[in-house]
Amino acid sequence: MKDHFEMFAAYNRWANETLYAAAATLTPEEFDSNRGAHFGSMKGTLNHLLCADRIWMRRFTGAGDAPAALNVILFEELSALETARKAEDERIADWVAGVEEESLGQNFTYTPITNPQLVTQKLGSAMFHFFNHQTHHRGQCHMILTGLGKPSLILDLVYFQRFAGKQWL
């Protein structure tokens, strides 16, 4: 199962690079405008993704900065946000590379921000959520872009698998 997570970490990096390249075409006003996504704007949604990833990585590793809320604007400007995103994607990939296969079936306990009561689940299950969450909000970013008249992005996992030129599984 670990190879699945290595693929998801690589896909995550690739999809974020694709998304940030598209976000770079936005004017500051478009980047900041509320487009009806859960976190409003492209800025809000991309910041949320970084917030959530940092929160989960803090849970997984016990290290790193993690905001106390899911809607914190960590970075106002796209360039600073992109630099932080690249560093976080590298951190994710490095951590996944070091995860032992046996640990994926072990219990993992954490406290959610939205409901501060302990939750225990298998580490592998939490990791599936972690990567799925990113995909969910990248879909909202895609909606923001297309709503602004920008070209549609191809972010499908199968496209990544073909693009990457590696047989993942």
Image: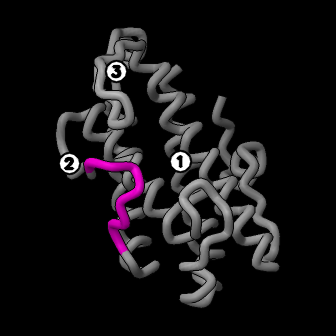
Taken as a whole, is the magenta stretch helix, strand or loop? loop
Instruction: Give the mark, 3 or 1, whose residue is nearer the N terminus.
Output: 1
| Residue bearing mark 1 | 10
| Residue bearing mark 2 | 64
Camera-side mark, 1 or 2: 2
In the rendered image, the vertical position of residue 27 relative to residue 56, given as above or below: below
The crowd level at tag 2 (other Cα within 10 Å; few <14, some 14-19, many 20+) is: few
Query: Image quadrant for the C terminus?
Result: top right
Give x and y (percent) for residue 115: 36, 28
Magenta segment boundaries in residue numbering = 68-75
Q: Judging from the image, what secondary structure is the residue with disc 3 in?
A: loop
Q: Residue 71's quadrant in the figure?
A: bottom left
Q: Residue 140's quadrant in the figure?
A: bottom right
Q: Judging from the image, what secondary structure is the residue with disc 1 in?
A: helix
Instruction: Give the mark, 3 or 2, whose residue is nearer the N terminus.
Output: 2
Give x and y (percent) for residue 134: 55, 46
Identity, as a three-letter code, of the amino acid under mark 3:
Glu
What residue sits 43% from the left and 71% below the top?
82
Give x and y (percent) for residue 146: 79, 70
**C-alpha span from label 3 to label 2:** 20 Å
What residue sits 40% from the left and 47% below the top?
53
Identity, as a three-letter code, of the amino acid under mark 1:
Ala
| Residue bearing mark 3 | 100
119 on left or right of 15: left
